[in-house]
Amino acid sequence: MTDYIDNPNKYQTDNTPLAQAMMRAQAAQAEADKAKQDALAAEATERTKQEEIDRAVELSMSRMNQQLQAQRLGVKTQGAIRSQDVGVIPPMAEVEKTTVRVLGGIEVSYRQAKDMAEVGQITQAEFNKAVVDGLAVRGYAAPKSFT
Protein backbone atom coordinates (compact mmCIF):
# COMPACT_ATOMS: atom_id res chain seq x y z
CA MET A 1 0.00 0.00 0.00
CA THR A 2 1.28 3.42 -0.94
CA ASP A 3 1.51 6.00 1.79
CA TYR A 4 0.64 9.52 0.60
CA ILE A 5 1.51 12.61 2.55
CA ASP A 6 -1.28 15.18 2.67
CA ASN A 7 0.77 17.83 0.94
CA PRO A 8 -1.00 19.27 -2.13
CA ASN A 9 2.28 20.26 -3.78
CA LYS A 10 3.41 16.64 -3.85
CA TYR A 11 0.44 15.56 -5.97
CA GLN A 12 0.76 18.29 -8.57
CA THR A 13 3.63 16.47 -10.16
CA ASP A 14 2.20 13.06 -9.42
CA ASN A 15 -0.07 11.94 -12.30
CA THR A 16 -1.39 8.82 -10.66
CA PRO A 17 -5.19 8.40 -10.51
CA LEU A 18 -5.12 8.83 -6.75
CA ALA A 19 -3.23 12.11 -7.05
CA GLN A 20 -5.65 13.40 -9.69
CA ALA A 21 -8.60 12.38 -7.47
CA MET A 22 -7.06 14.25 -4.55
CA MET A 23 -6.59 17.38 -6.68
CA ARG A 24 -10.23 17.19 -7.85
CA ALA A 25 -11.35 16.71 -4.25
CA GLN A 26 -9.36 19.73 -3.11
CA ALA A 27 -10.81 21.85 -5.94
CA ALA A 28 -14.32 20.67 -5.06
CA GLN A 29 -13.70 21.43 -1.38
CA ALA A 30 -12.48 24.95 -2.24
CA GLU A 31 -15.55 25.49 -4.43
CA ALA A 32 -17.82 24.19 -1.66
CA ASP A 33 -16.15 26.51 0.87
CA LYS A 34 -16.65 29.50 -1.45
CA ALA A 35 -20.32 28.57 -2.00
CA LYS A 36 -20.80 28.25 1.76
CA GLN A 37 -19.23 31.68 2.34
CA ASP A 38 -21.45 33.20 -0.36
CA ALA A 39 -24.54 31.61 1.20
CA LEU A 40 -23.58 32.88 4.67
CA ALA A 41 -23.00 36.38 3.28
CA ALA A 42 -26.38 36.35 1.51
CA GLU A 43 -28.06 35.09 4.69
CA ALA A 44 -26.41 37.84 6.75
CA THR A 45 -27.53 40.47 4.23
CA GLU A 46 -31.08 39.10 4.31
CA ARG A 47 -31.07 39.03 8.12
CA THR A 48 -29.87 42.65 8.22
CA LYS A 49 -32.63 43.74 5.83
CA GLN A 50 -35.26 41.86 7.86
CA GLU A 51 -34.03 43.45 11.10
CA GLU A 52 -34.25 46.87 9.47
CA ILE A 53 -37.82 46.14 8.31
CA ASP A 54 -38.75 44.88 11.78
CA ARG A 55 -37.36 48.05 13.40
CA ALA A 56 -39.25 50.25 10.93
CA VAL A 57 -42.50 48.37 11.55
CA GLU A 58 -42.04 48.55 15.30
CA LEU A 59 -41.35 52.28 15.13
CA SER A 60 -44.34 52.83 12.87
CA MET A 61 -46.61 50.80 15.13
CA SER A 62 -45.42 52.62 18.24
CA ARG A 63 -46.13 55.98 16.58
CA MET A 64 -49.53 54.72 15.40
CA ASN A 65 -50.34 53.43 18.87
CA GLN A 66 -49.35 56.77 20.37
CA GLN A 67 -51.62 58.56 17.90
CA LEU A 68 -54.52 56.22 18.61
CA GLN A 69 -54.04 56.59 22.34
CA ALA A 70 -53.91 60.38 22.00
CA GLN A 71 -57.09 60.37 19.90
CA ARG A 72 -58.86 58.24 22.50
CA LEU A 73 -57.87 60.74 25.16
CA GLY A 74 -59.13 63.59 22.98
CA VAL A 75 -55.72 65.07 22.26
CA LYS A 76 -55.43 66.54 18.78
CA THR A 77 -52.52 65.00 16.87
CA GLN A 78 -50.79 66.14 13.73
CA GLY A 79 -52.54 63.39 11.76
CA ALA A 80 -55.10 63.92 9.05
CA ILE A 81 -58.19 65.90 9.93
CA ARG A 82 -61.23 63.69 10.00
CA SER A 83 -64.72 64.87 9.13
CA GLN A 84 -65.86 63.77 12.59
CA ASP A 85 -63.38 66.19 14.13
CA VAL A 86 -64.57 69.14 12.10
CA GLY A 87 -68.18 68.17 11.60
CA VAL A 88 -69.64 67.82 8.15
CA ILE A 89 -72.25 70.47 7.49
CA PRO A 90 -75.12 68.94 5.52
CA PRO A 91 -77.10 70.70 2.80
CA MET A 92 -80.32 72.43 3.89
CA ALA A 93 -82.44 69.63 2.38
CA GLU A 94 -80.73 67.20 4.78
CA VAL A 95 -81.22 69.60 7.72
CA GLU A 96 -84.94 69.71 6.95
CA LYS A 97 -85.14 65.88 7.18
CA THR A 98 -83.82 65.96 10.75
CA THR A 99 -86.12 65.09 13.63
CA VAL A 100 -85.65 67.28 16.67
CA ARG A 101 -86.63 67.08 20.35
CA VAL A 102 -88.50 70.02 21.84
CA LEU A 103 -90.46 70.73 25.02
CA GLY A 104 -88.66 68.23 27.22
CA GLY A 105 -88.12 65.44 24.69
CA ILE A 106 -91.07 65.46 22.30
CA GLU A 107 -89.75 64.34 18.92
CA VAL A 108 -91.05 66.36 15.97
CA SER A 109 -89.93 67.08 12.43
CA TYR A 110 -87.80 70.07 11.55
CA ARG A 111 -90.79 71.74 9.85
CA GLN A 112 -93.04 71.27 12.91
CA ALA A 113 -90.37 72.65 15.23
CA LYS A 114 -89.86 75.64 12.94
CA ASP A 115 -93.63 76.30 12.95
CA MET A 116 -93.64 76.04 16.76
CA ALA A 117 -90.86 78.64 16.93
CA GLU A 118 -92.71 80.95 14.53
CA VAL A 119 -95.93 80.90 16.58
CA GLY A 120 -94.08 81.25 19.88
CA GLN A 121 -94.59 77.79 21.41
CA ILE A 122 -90.79 77.52 21.71
CA THR A 123 -88.13 80.19 21.51
CA GLN A 124 -85.81 80.56 18.53
CA ALA A 125 -82.90 79.58 20.78
CA GLU A 126 -84.69 76.36 21.79
CA PHE A 127 -85.40 75.60 18.11
CA ASN A 128 -81.76 76.21 17.15
CA LYS A 129 -80.49 74.02 20.01
CA ALA A 130 -82.90 71.24 19.05
CA VAL A 131 -81.69 71.35 15.42
CA VAL A 132 -78.03 71.35 16.51
CA ASP A 133 -78.66 68.34 18.79
CA GLY A 134 -80.68 66.51 16.10
CA LEU A 135 -77.92 66.98 13.55
CA ALA A 136 -75.27 65.86 16.05
CA VAL A 137 -77.16 62.59 16.59
CA ARG A 138 -76.95 62.00 12.83
CA GLY A 139 -73.21 62.83 12.80
CA TYR A 140 -73.48 66.29 11.26
CA ALA A 141 -72.40 69.73 12.39
CA ALA A 142 -75.01 72.45 12.35
CA PRO A 143 -74.81 75.30 9.82
CA LYS A 144 -73.53 78.58 11.26
CA SER A 145 -77.02 80.07 11.30
CA PHE A 146 -78.07 77.59 14.03
CA THR A 147 -75.10 78.07 16.35
Image (tube, grey):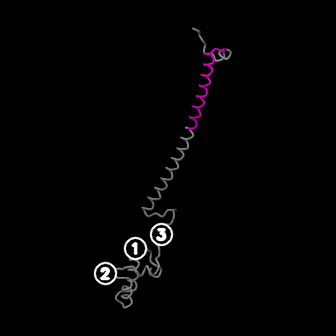
Give the CA distance from mark 1 to mark 2.
Answer: 17 Å
Between discs 1 and 2, the one toward the N terminus: 2
The answer to whether residue 59 is magenta is no
Side of 37 where 140 appears, left or right: left
Secondary structure of residue under mark 2: strand
Residue bearing the label numbered 3 = 83
Report whether 11 appears left or right of 67.
right
- The answer to whether the residues at label 1 and label 3 have Cβ atoms under 8 Å apart is no
Assess whether residue 22 is covered by the magenta stretch: yes
Image point (48%, 64%), residue name: 76
Residue, far top: 1
Mark toward the viewer: 1 or 2: 1
Q: Residue 106 carries which label?
A: 2
- In percent of the image, x 44 and y 75: which residue is there? 141
Q: Is residue 69 above or below residue 40?
A: below
- Identify the residue at horizontal 36%, vertical 80% (top origin): 100
Amino acid type at mark 2:
Ile
Q: Main secondary structure of the magenta part?
A: helix
CA distance separating discs 2 and 3? 29 Å
| Residue stretch rendered in magenta on the structure | 14-42
Q: Residues within 10 Å of mark 1 (few under 14, many from 20)?
A: few
Image quadrant holding the C terminus, namely: bottom left
Looking at the image, is 50 positioned above or below residue 117? above
Residue bearing the label numbered 1? 138
Q: What residue type is labelled 3?
A: Ser
1 is higher (above) or lower (below) than 70: above
- Marks 1 and 3, how far apart at CA: 13 Å
Where disc 3 sits, the SS reads helix
